[in-house]
Amino acid sequence: MPNYPTHARWGKIGAGAIGTLVAAAIYFFSMSAPLAFAAGLAAAAATFVGSIYPDIDHHTSTPRQKAVRWFQGLLVFAIASLAGLGWTAFVGGVESVSTSAGVTLPVSPEVAAAVTVVLVAIVATALVDPLIGLVTNRHRGWTHSVPINAVLVALLLGGLWFLLGDLTFERRVTALVVTGTFYAGTLIHLGLDGEIP
């Protein structure tokens, strides 16, 4: 079976080809150079990610390690953003809970709230790798299945079509085409692994 460098090399080749095709098609469809350029770059990125993603089911693989780091970063960003957006209410909640519990905080409510946010982020990031393992279960499982990936991408595309209902038709189609290139990348990976009959 091919290793990460082989998957990454063919993923880059596929990303270049598919990104170029998508950019040309979107330009022809919309006559918008900025939209075509952005779609081409996004399609190239989605294709590359798709070409390495099936190996997230292997605990020591490079894609798994990268996925864990990215998810951890996104979680920290999301937790910090939510805390920042609702900071006043959060600090008030910490103060209210300590008062109702009859506990005198040894620090200000702001410091207690900040410590709570840090502790939640630490626990959440520690759970990322075990949760990926729980979802993927075993190497060469569902992430290496052509039909399961097709269904998952189809569900994702359907959800996107629904969520992007306020966009113009051409932008909705562009979003779906770009997202669909993830599946093309997955097929590159599965083809190299001999999973496509």
Image (cartoon, grey):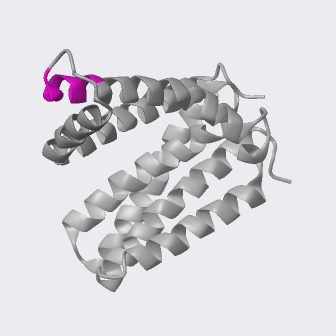
Task: Evaluate whether residue 25 shows in this view.
Answer: no
Of 156 and 15, nearer the camera is 156
Which residue is at 59% across, 40% downward?
53
Is residue 109 one of those drawn in magenta?
A: yes
Residue 88 in the image: state x and y as whole percent: 13, 44
Range drawn in magenta: 108-115
Instruction: Point out residue 49 in the picture as x, y percentages from the top left corner.
Output: 51, 42
- Give the side of residue 38 with respect to residue 172, left or right: left
**Residue 73 appears at what percent x and percent y?**
37, 31
Q: Tell me the chief SS of the magenta region.
A: helix
- Residue 98: say if magenta: no
| Residue that appears at 36% across and 23% down | 119
Q: Quadrant of residue 72?
A: top left
Horizontal side of residue 22 vs 93, given as left or right? right
Of residues 106 and 135, which is closer to you in this image?
106
Residue 183: image quadrant is: bottom right
Can you say whether 133 is above or below 168 in the image?
Answer: above
Toward the bottom, the furthest residue is 169
Where's residue 32, x and y in %? 22, 73
